[in-house]
C-alpha cells in the first residue's frame, strides 16, 4: 500500500506538472497574440483570423522549428517570431530580393520590418520562387509548416502541388502542415477558383494527400457563413482589400473577411 501511495503521488505530481507546462504554453501564445506592440491594423483583423485558436489547432509549441510559407506583410510573423524566439526557430519564405514590381516592393517592405521591428528578431528569411526552384530548407528539418491564404496564388500558377511537395519534404517524420485558405463552394470549376481567389476544400485535401500528407483534422475556426464567394472582384472584393473601393463598401464590410478552411495534415 505504501508503494502504491508513492506511485499514485508521483502520477498526480506528473499530471500536475504537465498541466502546468501546457498552461504556460497557452499563456505564451496568448501573450504573443495580445502583444500591444503588434501593428494595430493587423491586430484589428484578429476577429476574422482567430490567431490564438488557429495556432492552437495547428498544435504549435514554443520549442518547434517552424516554417511559414509566403509570409507576405508579416501578419503572422509578428505573433510567431516572439512566441518561438527563446526555445524554437521561425523561418519564413518570401519573394526573391531580385524580383521586380510588386514582388520587389513586398520583399523590401518585409526586410525593413526584419531590420527595424523587434517583433521580427531572430527569424530566418528564405528567398523562394513559385514554383520552387530549390528546397525551402534542409529535408526533414522542420516540425511544423504553415501557410495562410496562399493556396490560390499557387493554384493560379499551377504550382500548388509543387509547393505542398516541398512542404512535405522539409518536415520531419510526423511533422505537421497547417493550412488556412479562402474556401470555394464544392463543385466550383478550376477556372472559377483561379479567377476568384477561392479554393475548394476537397481540392486542397486531395492535392495534399497526393504528395503524401494525411489529413489529421479540419476546423471551422475561420468559417464565415456570410461569405458566398460570389463577388465582382473575387475574394479581393471583401475586406481588407476592398478592390471596389467605396462601391458597396458597407455591404462588404458587413460580410467581413472571407469564409476559410482550416486544415491540419501530418507527414
Image: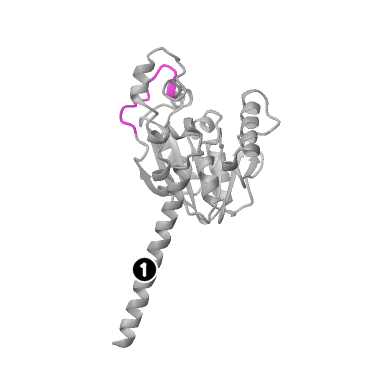
Q: Nearer the viewer, residue 205 or 28?
A: 28
> Which residue is at a point 34% across and 77% down the rendered structure image?
9
Which quarter of the figure is the N terminus placed in?
bottom left
User: Residue sitting at 44 percent across and 15 percent down?
Assistant: 244
Residue 253 magenta-drawn?
A: no
Residue at x-position 48% and y-position 44%: 210
Classify 230 as above or below 200.
above
Residue 76 rendering spot, x and y as whole percentages: 50, 39
How crowded pointer 1 is (Cα within 10 Å; few <14, some 14-19, many 20+) is rated as: few
Write the start and end of the magenta stretch as one range.
Answer: 224-235
Give the image location of residue 138, x and y in percent: 64, 51
Reply yes or no: does residue 234 show up in magenta. yes
Q: Name the element at disc 1.
A: helix
Q: Residue 90: x percent and y percent?
A: 57, 48
Q: Nearer the viewer, residue 242 or 122?
A: 122
Quadrant of the image occupied by residue 230: top left
Residue that mark 1 sits on: 15
Amino acid at each position: 500500500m505504501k508503494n502504491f501511495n508513492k506511485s499514485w503521488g508521483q502520477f498526480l505530481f506528473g499530471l500536475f506538472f504537465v498541466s502546468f507546462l501546457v498552461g504556460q504554453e497557452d499563456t505564451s501564445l496568448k501573450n504573443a497574440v495580445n502583444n500591444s506592440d503588434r501593428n494595430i491594423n493587423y491586430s484589428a483583423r484578429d476577429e476574422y483570423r482567430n490567431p490564438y485558436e488557429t495556432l492552437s489547432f495547428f498544435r504549435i509549441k514554443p520549442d518547434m522549428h517552424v516554417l511559414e510559407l509566403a509570409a507576405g506583410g508579416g501578419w503572422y510573423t509578428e505573433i510567431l517570431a516572439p512566441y518561438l524566439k527563446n526555445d524554437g526557430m521561425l523561418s519564413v519564405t518570401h519573394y526573391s530580393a531580385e524580383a521586380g514590381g510588386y514582388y520587389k516592393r513586398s520583399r523590401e517592405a518585409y526586410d525593413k520590418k526584419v531590420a527595424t521591428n523587434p517583433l521580427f528578431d531572430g527569424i530566418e528569411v528564405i528567398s523562394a520562387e513559385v514554383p520552387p526552384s530549390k528546397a525551402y530548407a534542409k529535408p526533414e528539418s522542420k516540425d511544423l509548416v504553415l501557410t495562410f491564404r496562399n493556396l490560390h496564388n499557387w493554384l493560379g500558377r499551377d504550382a500548388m502541388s509543387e509547393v505542398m511537395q516541398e512542404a512535405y519534404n522539409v518536415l520531419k517524420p510526423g511533422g505537421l502542415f497547417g493550412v488556412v485558405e479562402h474556401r470555394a463552394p464544392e463543385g466550383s470549376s478550376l477556372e472559377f477558383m483561379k479567377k476568384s481567389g477561392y479554393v475548394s476544400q476537397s481540392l486542397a485535401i486531395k492535392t495534399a494527400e497526393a504528395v503524401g500528407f494525411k489529413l489529421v483534422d479540419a476546423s471551422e475556426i475561420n468559417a464565415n457563413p456570410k461569405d458566398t464567394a460570389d463577388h465582382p472582384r473575387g475574394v479581393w472584393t471583401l475586406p481588407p482589400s476592398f478592390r471596389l473601393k467605396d462601391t458597396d463598401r458597407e455591404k462588404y464590410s458587413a460580410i467581413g473577411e472571407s469564409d476559410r478552411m482550416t486544415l491540419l495534415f501530418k507527414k
